[in-house]
Each structure stands twice: as structure tokens, then as C-alpha cells.
Image (cartoon, rainbow, N blue to C red):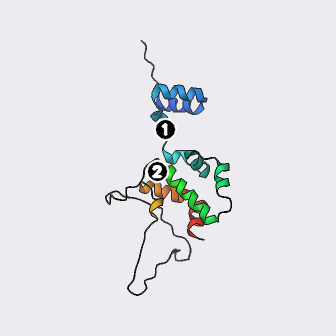
Amino acid sequence: METLQIDKANALKAHEEASIKGKSLLENLFGKKVFLKDVKDRIKNFDDVLAENGISREDFETSCKGLEPDEIAYRMAKLVCIAFNEGWLPDWTNSNEYKYAPYFRMGSSSGVGFSYHDYDVWAASSGVGSRLCFKSSDLASHAGKLFEQEIYKPLFTI
């Protein structure tokens, strides 16, 4: 039997340009993993987030009818986390497992948009919302930058 060799770059290009049947053939030959792009390469906008979650734009917009902009932004932020985390769920019983969230400087000229003020001896603090965390610092930073204006600003500045 004769063996054929193909460069990965050529296989990726062929997969990208192939029909659905052609993609399936290539995936059967080389395995699906060969053709999976990094999540940061797959997601460039919110429509990509919706596609990653199997939701149509029309269904998302219908589900948001009547909601305030911050409520829509919260729904969007949850979908961003789900998409970028690719099935990873934080284990809140494991304090050794790091969880990450985007960090923003919005608001005043000093760069501090969300101020903290100590009052008497009572204090409470929370660094991030626990449901909206990412599995890596890189993903949190990337998502925060990518969706700062479209999602995070409306979410955090009512």
C-alpha cells in the first residue's frame, strides 16, 4: 500500500475550502482535532459566540425582548464565558484552582470607575462575579478586550 503525506497547513487550507462532505472526509482521515482552531481564533464577535453556543441571532434577540440593556449584557457575558471556557466549569470547592475575570478601568479621569470607600469598621468585598469567570488569565483578558464596549461596559455601567 502506498502512503500519502500532506502538510498540516495544506490539510487546514483544504478543510477550510471544502464542502461539508469534504470537511467530513478530511476529519475522518486525520481526526477532528487536527482541524479545531483555538477558541480565540474561532470567536471574533458576538455572532461567533452565539454560533459556538448553538444559538441563532434571532432566537437570542427574541429571548431578550423587553429586557434592560444591562440584563441583555449579562446574558451576553454568560454566553461569552460558556463559549471561551469550552465546557470547563469552575470547581468552587477547590481553592487551588484559579479562576479569572476581565479587569476594567472605566469612568473617572483617574481611571477608577468603580470606587471603594471604607465605612466605619464594617467591610465587605468581592473581586469578581463568580459565575462569569474564565479558566485562564489569557482568555479573561482576551474576552474583556474583545467585548469591552459591546458587553462589559453596558453590564457594569447601568
Quarter of the view holding residue 150: bottom right
Q: For the residue marked with disc 2, what is the amino acid? A: Asn
The number of callouts visible is 2
Query: For the view shown, which residue lies furthest in the left direction?
Result: 96
**Between 12 and 98, the one nearer to me in the picture:** 98
Query: For the view shown, which residue lies furthest in the top direction?
Result: 1
Q: Secondary structure at mark 1?
A: loop
Which is more N-terminal, label 1 or label 2? Answer: 1
Vertical placement of residue 30 versus 132, above or below: above
Name the disc covering residue 85, or none.
Answer: 2
- Give residue 143's position: percent from left, percent from top: 51, 56
Crowding around mark 2 (Cα neighbors within 10 Å: few <14, some 14 to 19, many 20+) is: some
**Between 42 and 61, the one nearer to me in the picture:** 61
Give the residue at x 65% y 50%: 59
User: Would residue 68 appear left or right of 11 to someone viewing this image?
Assistant: right
Q: Secondary structure at mark 2?
A: helix
Q: Quadrant of the N terminus?
A: top left
Q: For the residue marked with disc 1, what is the amino acid? A: Leu
- Give residue 6's position: percent from left, percent from top: 47, 25
Q: CA distance from mark 2 to mark 1?
A: 15 Å
Residue 85 in sight: yes
Residue 147 in sight: no
Residue labelled with disc 1: 36
Quarter of the view holding residue 97: bottom left
Query: For the view shown, which residue lies furthest in the bottom direction?
Result: 120
Vertical placement of residue 119 versus 22, above or below: below
Q: Quadrant of the C terminus?
A: bottom right
